[in-house]
Image (cartoon, rainbow, N blue to C red):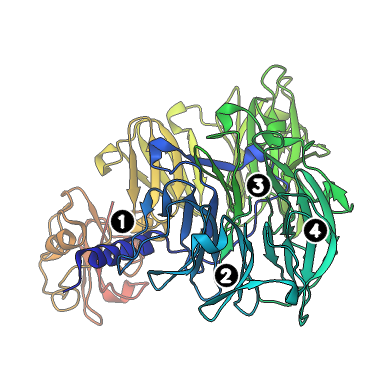
Amino acid sequence: MLPTHRLRALLHSCLLAVLCASGPPVHALDPAIPLDGYRHDRWGEAEGAPRFIDTLAQTADGWLWVAGRQAGLFRFDGVRFHPHETVDGSKLQNPGITVLRPARDGALWIGHGRGGVTVLRGGRYRHLLLPAQTGAVYAIAEDGDGVAWAATGRGLFRLAGGKAERVGTELGYPNARAEYALADGAGRLWAVDGQSLYVMTPGGKAFERVRAANANAMVIEAGDGGIWLVQGKAFARVASPSARRVLSPTGRGSSFQSVFDRDGNLWSGNCPVGVCVLRPAHWRHGAAFTPVDAAERFDEPWQMTSLTVVSMMEGRDGSIWIGTPSGLERLRDQPVHMVPELFDRGKSQAAPALDGGILTVQVRRFDDTAGLSRIAGGKVETLPDPLAARALDRAPDGTLVLAGERGIALHGRNGVQRFGLPPDLAASDNLRITKMVAGIGEFWLWTARSGPWHYRGGRWTAPSADVDANPAVVAADAAGRSYLGLPGNRLRIVDGAGTLDYDGTDGIGVGKFMFIWPGAPLLVSGRKARRSWPAAASIRCVPMCRAAWVSSTASSKAPAAPAGSMPNGASSACRRRTGRAPPATRAWHCGARCSIRSRATWAAAKPRTSPTRLSPRPMAGCGSPANAGSPGSIPASSRRTPPCRTWKCCR
């Protein structure tokens, strides 16, 4: 039997693996989005975050590791911080951790602020250097061969094959102290000793001195392969961009206070407080810069868990992780961003533009003037507006429809089509279009003074004098159907020349319609409730039930059911499919040609038999009422469609 600590650790690992399963990497934070447009998540003491998060790492399996100078090593699943437990009960050399660096083989290198280097591999700790050997550990780098280099207060150490050796003058490194180490994508190894910067090139046998460097300097790599020496807040390029020769590590580790993301944004902490971001255009063309004057920043106490930053890292998904003395923070992209230029301008309508981006119409709150704009790359561009547009919508087939005081314009694959407004509207001195809905070959137009005008087949239809016949909400689907939300809690579905009405007796009960979504399922909502039905593709016959007696009992000898009832076996079939028997008022339609224009009480036929039994109100498509010899029957010779084989219950 497994020891308790091993069993607990294994179960814990299984749970966290499910929670932290990660997908493929995505793009970094969009440079076109301002800093306050990203999603900003914060975890402080109340959420269980450890204090003084000095280092972060994400290993190849997707785990996010968090550590600091006080509390030891944690794994974070996006919600909770879990102290790490090994499968064999092995312990860290001490709880103070200053460095986490993922290894290429999936292991995790750990450096202690009080001294010592440990590797976590296979769920077990192995101590390779003791505190007395290293003093404080400042950085660990792993080169393309899997060799780790540890920068410590007592020198630079090389760790390979489970052994550690100190690097000295034999490799061109003369100092007994190392403050930083970096292995870059070009295969070079960089080291800083507090006085000078050194580099060992690929295939080289020893370090070479590059230039002088101050104490506490570090080296970071930009996304283009350029190498920058960071001394305080002064950045100086020490190597030009170069092609990557070493496979990118699958894991990621943090730096002290600054990091380049893959899109070239520089994220820096403590400039002089909080976090600032410098976009590529502001640093890429020079040999030196400072982010202190960056325009985008978080520097107010309410914006962060702490205005002191101690670690930063770009995650595999492009998120920026920030460690502070008071917790952990994350900046990530989100699908919805505020557009400050359009904020508080009254009513806005938007639709995807045909050439990319988003097209918007804004009607301003105070002066009722309107404007047409295009949003792309986070920027707003004002467009010419010959229509004086006040509403727009995109039809299910992708056609973009704009409506304005000077007419209607349809922007589709075949170019632009223009339509005039209804004469009565065009002659109005105070035309205020408030809303538009575009369908396939038709559209509806609302104004402030009238109900919806309907355009279809080259002509306009004025709003009905009966206000109960004018829809308040309209939606359209790609099959050409229209969905009208009418007063009195009624839903009308229009398919070509046919219509089908639903009301409270059919279970709608939403009150005044507010929203219709003709998807799968069909959703409608109002002031009282929300309802849904099966996919819109079968909305003409919902719920649909196939009777159990399809062919065997649907013969000329089958007795006719009374009006309003169902054939034998149909009710039980409907109950099996829907969980309940439909009320007696529900209509039954022939499965061969379900029409929404007529409601037969029931109809059945067996192939090549006659007569075909029908209700007194036969359904269109199963026969011709005009040719019926008597109520309830139609001669077989008069049938215009194949005989019905199935039954479908329709609302």
Where does label 4 land, which residue?
196
Would residue 123 appear left or right of 316 to someone viewing this image?
A: left
- Quarter of the figure with the N terminus: bottom left
Query: Which mark sits nearer the N-terminus, 4 or 2?
Result: 4
- Mark 2 vs mark 1, CA separation in Å: 51 Å
Which amino acid does the dot numbered 4 rest on?
Ser
**Circle nearer the N terminus (3, 2):** 2
Looking at the rendered structure, the secondary structure element under dot 2 is: loop
* Residue kind at label 2, given as amino acid type: Thr
Label pair 4/2, CB-CB below 8 angstroms: no
Q: Residue 266 location in percent, x, y?
A: 73, 49
How far apart are labels 1 and 3 at the CA level? 61 Å
N-term-proximal mark, 2 vs 1: 2
Q: CA distance from mark 3 to mark 2?
A: 22 Å
Q: Secondary structure at mark 4?
A: strand
The residue that label 3 is drawn on is 257
- Point out the frontmost of discs 3 and 4: 4
Q: Amino acid at mark 3?
A: Gln
Residue 7 screen position, x and y as percent: 23, 67
Q: Nearer the viewer, residue 471 or 174?
A: 174
Q: Earlier in the sequence, mark 1 or mark 3?
A: 3
Q: CA distance from mark 4 to mark 2?
A: 30 Å
Amino acid type, mark 1:
Val
Q: Residue at x 74, y 66 (%)?
A: 190
Identify the disc placed on residue 250.
Answer: 2
Which SS class for mark 1? loop
Query: Residue 66's mark?
Result: none
Q: Quadrant of residue 596?
A: bottom left
Residue located beneath label 1 in the image: 542
Q: Nearer the viewer, mark 2 or mark 1?
A: 2
Q: Is residue 611 left or right of residue 462?
A: left
